[in-house]
Image: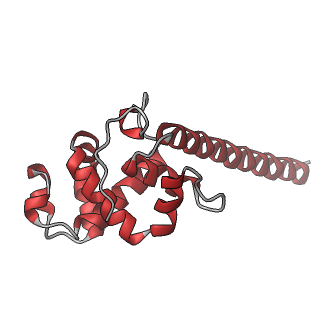
Amino acid sequence: MVETTGGGPQDGAAEVLDRPLPDGVRRRVVQIVADGFGGLTVAELPAQLRQYARFTPTRRAKFAGNAMAAALETDPLFRQRIGEKLRESQPELTGALDSGSPPPAADPLDVAAAAYVLRPPGWVKLVTAAGEEAQRADAERADEETRAELERLRAELDRAR
């Protein structure tokens, strides 16, 4: 287990995200918390989350997603505990983030979610980049759907003539 005190100018604890978490990153963060939650004792949980202790990770994510995200943001000790569970379950990804070089083949949303939980130096940049990448992918997907619809309508028009 790695313990960090955080808050120093050289680490990521002093960085602040100036916008809401991108939706895809938020979903991954909630899933990380829901999975790590089960490895904590009731006493280690913030008071507002104790009622969800007996839930399965899927039910926890569904019913306590907002509460878990809020607790992760406002409770540094809870975030540290979830970070320790994340380090146990994904040692390669967390090790790469700690070294400052996220794996290039990793899903950007996974990297951003892990960075949000662990708060290594530069975590805000990783979260922002993942959000921009997700928006770019959504725009490309919408563009492809629009092109396909245009082709379909042109073909329909040709048949009608």
The residue at the point 89 percent across, 54 percent down is 159
- Depth order, front residue of 116/119: 119
Image quadrant where residue 58 sits:
bottom left
Decide: is 71 above or below 55. Answer: above
Image quadrant where residue 88 sits:
bottom left
Say left or right for 121 vs 60. Answer: right
Q: Is residue 24 visible?
A: yes
Q: Position of residue 113 (x, y in %)?
A: 44, 52
- Depth order, front residue of 81/133: 81
Say left or right for 126 vs 37. Answer: right
- Specify the quadrant that holds the N terminus: bottom left
Image quadrant where residue 102 sits:
bottom right
Say left or right for 72 vs 48. Answer: right
Numbered-mark total: 0
Say left or right for 46 vs 153. Answer: left
The residue at the point 32 percent across, 36 percent down is 7
Decide: is 37 above or below 12. Answer: below
